[in-house]
């Protein structure tokens, strides 16, 4: 744990409060994470074709806006039997979490193959044209019905490999150890520690 005054400040380029909580839990002891939306209310458009393109666009946008190191997370759920859908459109697959899950389960109704993966790409932008990307993946299965109260998004229908419960049933301690976000952030931590 670094003393607060010695911790570098990073602006987090996300409007998703749930992501911010998970990110702070995993790297909050190393850096001071300031959420962009606590500074100003802005919705950054996402028009990339990959998680990396979207994440880079968000991080660069915030770096240009603030002139301070910025970190973005673009993530999604990639389902094998749906040719990778919802993928980069995970946030836009329905009007709320309930709607997105209902659409996913409906599209999978006649499918035996329930394999899926959560993927996250973090981009850390620390200068004009200067950035580093960190990827994380968590493989698993889509359940038949939503279960559990924790987490957000597709957590109630995602059963990580090696477990019998969904992320939403397992809760934050387990999720923050094995998730796509945790895996990517461990790489980012290592990178930061080397820079300090
Ligand atoms: P920002 O762009 O502001 O960061 P967002 O929610 O729009 O927030 P994305 O464009 O990266 O973020 O979309 C990611 C979507 O993928 C998210 O809204 C969820 O629906 C889903 N998702 C990503 N990580 C997840 C997780 O850990 N658990 C459940 N669902 C997740």
Image (tube, helix red, strand yellow):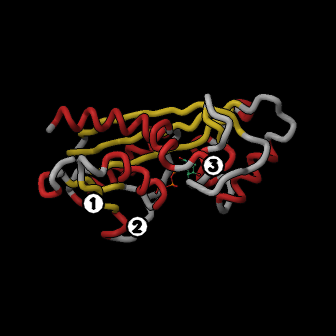
The dot on residue 26 is: none
Q: Residue at x 72, y 58 (%)?
A: 99
Secondary structure under tag 3 reads helix
Callout 2: 10 Å neighbours few (<14), some, many (20+)? Answer: few
Q: Earlier in the sequence, mark 2 or mark 3?
A: 2
The quadrant of the image that shows the C terminus is top left
Q: How many marks?
A: 3
Q: Nearer the viewer, mark 3 or mark 1?
A: 3
The picture places residue 128, in percent across and down from the top left corner, at 22, 45
Q: Are marks 1 and 2 in contact (CB under 8 Å)?
A: yes
Q: Residue at x 51, y 32 (%)?
A: 137
Q: Nearer the viewer, mark 2 or mark 3?
A: 3
Q: Which mark is residue 42?
A: 2
Q: Is residue 167 left or right of residue 104?
A: left
Residue 190: image quadrant is: top left
- What kind of element bears circle 1? helix
């Amino acid at each position: 744990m670094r003393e607060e005054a010695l911790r570098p400040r990073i602006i987090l380029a996300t409007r998703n409060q749930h992501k911010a909580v998970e990110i702070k839990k995993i790297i909050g002891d190393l850096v001071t994470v300031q959420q962009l939306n606590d500074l100003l209310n802005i919705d950054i458009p996402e028009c990339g074709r990959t998680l990396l393109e979207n994440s880079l666009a968000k991080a660069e946008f915030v770096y240009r806006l603030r002139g301070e190191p910025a970190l973005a997370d673009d993530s999604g759920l990639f389902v094998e039997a749906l040719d990778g859908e919802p993928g980069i459109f995970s946030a836009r697959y329905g009007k709320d979490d309930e709607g997105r899950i209902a659409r996913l389960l409906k599209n999978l109704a006649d499918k035996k193959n329930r394999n899926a993966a959560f993927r996250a790409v973090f981009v850390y932008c620390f200068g004009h044209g200067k950035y580093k990307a960190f990827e994380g993946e968590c493989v698993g299965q889509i359940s038949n019905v939503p279960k559990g109260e924790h987490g957000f998004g597709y957590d109630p229908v995602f059963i990580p490999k090696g477990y019998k419960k969904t992320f939403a049933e397992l809760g934050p301690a387990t999720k923050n150890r094995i998730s796509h976000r945790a895996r990517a952030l461990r790489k980012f931590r290592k990178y930061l520690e080397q820079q300090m």
